[in-house]
Image (cartoon, coloured by chain):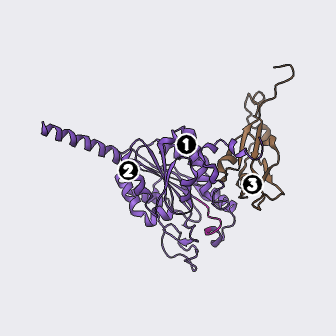
Chain colours: A brown, B purple
């Protein structure tokens, strides 16, 4: 196994910016199957500690900055209770 | 976005009948994932919703026709393919998709399935295989694995199951694929490919049934079953479907068959026009 510091790094990895994601969860549609929590590749979701109106624990956002908009949670959710959108970049103060 | 209308902002919301949501399927059921993948596929293809027809049979997945916001029909038990054949032959412009379960398509509807595949009727069949009759309480069916426990096989199943992909390929389907409900991206890609193909396409999705089959067989929660899918499934494109038996230690998934063959509808229309021309010539 090659040590991590010798791993190849993409040449433009510093210029590429990961998109900022916004995770939208509709708690009352969730049936609590936990697929999104379990299969999120970046572990951006966790189980919430509040019951929803169906009596299950829906997911909640653990760390929104980890999300890379891969859309796997949206694709695997059987209940259409979660989706992600790209967060609009805030325009900087000097208008650039 | 307020909490109440958040569902409207889901990019697939326009394909769903909102007033019928949430659906009746259990937590962790693969049917919701199949519906999700199908909607993603029609969203990606950007098909005219007036040109697509969804036909479903009886069973848990049969409810799918009520949830999709296209022309759809919930047929009697096992007759989804018979109905779909009629729709396709009456109006060849329509894209006809049958979404049904293993019990509906292969037990009572088995003959319709093999003959539609043999004739190569231009319909797409997507089967959610959960290894038992879920809606009626978990009786054993044609896909229940050997030795599996169900409500009607309390000492273990003594019947050998169907290998659905092999059956479809042997009967003459032009496109046969199998995925589990964990392979959402590949399932979507397969549905897109099948929708663009002419002829009888068959996609099998292996689904967890966490409330009944998996509970009787002590397979844990839906997440455990999905982890088991991840552990045992192997992607083998083009593999011989006869060898792709579903066992406890191995589920071969992939696109098994992808061939070209003239469809029944095309041959029928060609024959009709040929005979009509001949009759006209004889009259004149």
* Inter-mark Cα distance, 2 to 3: 42 Å
Where is residue A35? Give x, y as percent.
70, 55
Quadrant in which the C terminus of chain B is drawn: top left
In the displayed structure, B76 sits above or below B47; it is below
Q: Are marks 3 and 1 in contact (CB under 8 Å)?
A: no
Secondary structure mostly seen in magenta is loop
Callout 3: helix, strand or loop?
Answer: helix
In the displayed structure, B180 sits above or below A87; it is below
Where is residue B188? Give x, y as percent.
57, 46
Mark number for residue A28? 3
User: Quick one: label 2 or label 1, which is nearer the N terminus?
Assistant: 1
Q: Are marks 2 and 1 in contact (CB under 8 Å)?
A: no
Quadrant in which the N terminus of chain B is drawn: top right
Left/right placement of residue B2 relative to residue B166 reads right
Where is residue B60? Give x, y as percent.
57, 62
Please name whichever residue, A36 or B179, is drawn nearer the observer in this view of the structure. Answer: A36
User: Do circles 2 and 1 both sit on a common chain?
Assistant: yes
Please report, as a chain letter, where disc 3 is located.
Answer: A
* Inter-mark Cα distance, 2 to 1: 21 Å
| Residue occupying the point 53% across, 69% down | B144
Callout 2: helix, strand or loop?
Answer: loop
Callout in the foreground (3, 1): 3
Callout in the foreground (2, 3): 3
Please name whichever residue, B136 or A84, is drawn nearer the observer in this view of the structure. Answer: B136
Left/right placement of residue B203 relative to residue B6 reads left
In the displayed structure, B162 sits above or below B9; it is below
Residue projecting furthest to the bottom: B155
Residue projecting furthest to the right: A93
* Inter-mark Cα distance, 3 to 1: 26 Å
- Magenta stretch in the rendered image: B207-213
Q: Which residue is mark 2?
A: B121
Q: Which residue is mark 1?
A: B42
């Amino acid at each position: 196994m090659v040590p991590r510091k010798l791993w190849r790094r993409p040449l433009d990895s510093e210029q590429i910016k990961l998109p900022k994601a916004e995770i939208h969860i509709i708690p009352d549609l969730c049936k609590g199957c936990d697929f999104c929590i379990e299969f999120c590749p970046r572990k951006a979701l966790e189980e919430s500690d509040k019951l929803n109106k169906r009596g299950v624990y829906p997911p909640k956002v653990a760390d929104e900055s980890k999300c890379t908009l891969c859309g796997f949670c949206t694709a695997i959710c059987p209940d259409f209770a979660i989706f992600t959108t790209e967060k609009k970049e805030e325009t900087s103060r000097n208008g650039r | 976005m307020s909490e109440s209308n958040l569902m409207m902002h889901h990019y697939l919301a326009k394909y769903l009948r909102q007033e019928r949501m949430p659906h009746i399927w259990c937590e962790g059921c693969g049917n919701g994932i199949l519906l999700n993948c199908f909607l993603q596929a029609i969203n990606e293809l950007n098909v005219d919703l007036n040109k697509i027809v969804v036909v479903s049979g009886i069973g848990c997945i049969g409810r799918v026709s009520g949830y999709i916001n296209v022309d759809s029909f919930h047929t009697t038990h096992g007759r989804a393919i018979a109905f779909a054949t009629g729709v396709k032959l009456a109006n060849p412009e329509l894209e006809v998709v049958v979404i049904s379960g293993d019990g509906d398509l292969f037990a009572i509807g088995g003959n319709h399935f093999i003959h539609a595949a043999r004739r190569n009727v231009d319909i797409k069949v997507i089967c959610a295989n959960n290894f038992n009759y879920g809606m009626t309480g978990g009786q054993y069916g044609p896909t229940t694995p050997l030795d599996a426990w169900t409500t009607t096989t309390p000492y273990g199943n003594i019947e050998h199951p169907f290998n659905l992909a092999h059956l479809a390929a042997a009967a003459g389907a032009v496109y046969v694929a199998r995925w589990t409900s964990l392979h959402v991206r590949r399932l979507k890609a397969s549905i897109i490919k099948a929708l663009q193909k002419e002829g009888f396409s068959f996609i099998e999705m292996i689904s967890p049934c966490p409330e009944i089959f998996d509970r009787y067989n002590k397979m844990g929660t839906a997440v455990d079953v999905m982890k088991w899918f991840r552990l045992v499934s192997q992607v083998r494109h083009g593999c011989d479907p006869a060898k792709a038996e579903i066992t406890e230690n191995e589920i071969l998934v992939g696109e098994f068959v992808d061939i070209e063959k003239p469809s029944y509808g095309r041959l029928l229309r060609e024959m009709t026009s040929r005979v009509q021309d001949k009759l006209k010539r004889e009259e004149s």
